Image (cartoon, grey):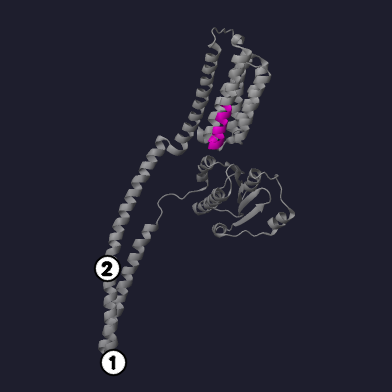
Amino acid sequence: MLLWIQRNLLKSGAYFALAAYLGFGGLDLAVNGPASLIPAALLAIGLFTGRLRDWSAVIAIVMAAAANLFLDVKPGFSGGITLVTIAMVAAFGSRLWALITLGTAVLAGIALVSKLVFVTGLSVFDVSTYGANASLNVALFGYGLVISTSLAAFLIGRLAITLTTHVGTSFDQVVSSRERRRLQLQIAEQDARFEIAKDISELVIQRLTAAVSLADGASFALRGESELAERTLGQVSQSARQAHVELRRLYDMLNKLDKVHAAPPGIADLEPLVPLYRELGYNIMLNHLGKKLELEEGLELAIYRIVFDALENIQSHVPRGADVTIDFIWSEGGMQVLVKDNGVEVANRSAGLVAGGYGVDEDQKALVETITGAGITAMRERAGLYRGSIEATRVPGVGFTISAIFPELSR
């Protein structure tokens, strides 16, 4: 379920927002009247857009609380939409914005409880309080309810994504156990090969030592008896051939250690990187446009490594909170993958600079600049193996873009 939500941001967000609005908003309509639909609608919009931009959920919660206060709407079932929003942001958003959403929801709930108890009065619910501390006790109970339910929603969201992404299902644990046993067996096999390699190496050394001794004897024999020298050189040749055979056996033995038994990562393995980079504080999205083509394993591995290296570069140089998009654009016979970030824009905002504040020089530099470096060179070499190309460009005032183009794909 959670993996489906991760892979279908817009569709899942729309379903959840519509279901929450019809369910919780419908209950509020029946109990509190038409005015309650406005806060419910704002919260539903925040639930939908919060899947794309974490901060929009915070804005929606604040606006819904303000609507409740100014429209004098009694708190009702729409708070359930807030709890769903908290859980969703906690599960799929960055950790920073998940905590901000939780704090905003708690403060908004405390404000609504305070207005209800100390300003409006509980008489709107046909409830009367008696005693000097009655209102305070009711308010404290309401505060505790708001905090506990919000925290529970946050923890449910964190637990769900952790079990799905980091801990894994029972099937994942079985696969992990089998993989661990396979690796143990492979290590044992490698130890045995090393023992054999040691024996072969010792034999090769003996063969080469004999060949050297025979060659020295032949050099002396050449000064006297030619027949003896011929026999000695024949023995040298035979010993050298035997040493060559043993070296070939040793080479083949050692090269078996380099075989990779596990399937190499491919494009589908980029999906788990999305929640990982959201945890690191980036607003990352992975999109596929067009019908995906079937690719050979080597090409998928090259594309995976290009995107992986681009994300590693973003983590090293781009500030947290930046938007990162990975777009796969598929055509009939080729594809293009774009990895874009707005790190410069985020850095400028943090420094208090005006968005888009760059000059003509930066525009001209971006048009003619050739970006180089070890990482870019490695990407170009990988792409070149499959008739592809890499373009690295700076977008003035925005950020950095890596474009990998493969015009001719075949399986």
Q: Mark 1 sits on what residue?
A: 223
SS category of the residue bearing label 2: helix
Does 195 appear above or below 157? Answer: below
Secondary structure state at the residue bearing disc 1: loop
At which x and y percent is residue 381? 55, 60
Residue 239 in the image: x percent, y percent? 28, 76
Span shown in magenta = 92-105
In whole angstroms, how far apart are the C-alphas of marks 1 and 2?
33 Å
Magenta-highlighted stretch: main secondary structure?
A: helix
Q: Which of marks 1 and 2 is in front?
A: 2
- Identify the mark nearer the N-term, 1 or 2: 2
State the residue position of label 2: 202
In depth, the one of 9 and 218 nearer the eye is 9
Location of residue 207 (image quadrant): bottom left
Q: How many marks?
A: 2
Residue 330 in view of the camera: no
Residue 261 in view:
yes
- Mark 1 packing: few (<14 Cα in 10 Å), some, or many (20+)? few
Give residue 175's quadrant in the image.
top left
Q: Looking at numbered disc 2 in the image, what kind of residue is underneath it?
A: Glu
- Toward the front, the furthest residue is 132
Q: Which amino acid does label 1 sit on?
A: Arg
